[in-house]
Amino acid sequence: MKNTLNEITKDIMSLASKKGFGTKPEEIELGEKFALLHTEVSEAYQAYRKNNLDGKNGFNEELADIILRTLHICGIYGIDIEKEIDEKMSYNKDREWDWDSLNEKHVK
Ligand SMILES: [Mg+2]
């Protein structure tokens, strides 16, 4: 990766400041940011359904949008997402799921 997630977050915050997207909690509506994050998830799935994988507004680009919007929220709230990911991955390594109780696809 060219930059770490925290470095990308800094770039996003710089851009957010220049473009007026908000850099502090009082400058945004968190619900709106989450709604836009949901939009990117839907766009990613629609692109996948239409088999637009790496084109403009394609699946790959929409996945990037999901991460960029998430990192923007992290920047606004001062969240060290690398630390959070490390901690969560460490937790998940030893975590067990009761797949028999879940109505969800799982490869055993
Ligand atoms: Mg998008």
Image (tube, rainbow, N blue to C red):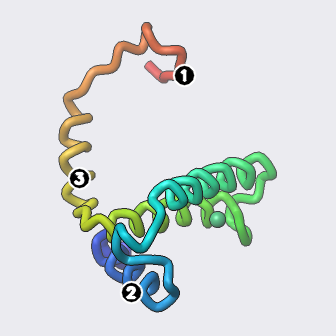
Residue 78, by quadrant, is bottom left
For mark 2, give the secondary structure: helix
For mark 3, give the secondary structure: helix
Mark 1 or 2: the one toward you: 2
Q: Which of disc 3 and disc 1 is earlier in sequence?
A: 3
Among all residues in the image, which is located at the extreme front? Answer: 26
Which residue matches tag 2? 14
Among all residues in the image, which is located at the extreme bottom? Answer: 18
Q: Nearer the viewer, residue 52 or 28?
A: 28
Q: Residue at x 73, y 71 (%)?
A: 56
CA separation in Å, label 1 and label 2:
40 Å
Q: Check disc 2 and give the amino acid type.
A: Ser
Q: Residue at x 63, y 55 (%)?
A: 39
Mark 3 or 2: the one toward you: 2
Q: Residue at x 70, y 59 (%)?
A: 53
Q: Position of residue 35 (x, y in %)?
A: 57, 54
Quadrant for the N terminus in the image: bottom left
Q: Which of disc 2 and disc 1 is earlier in sequence?
A: 2
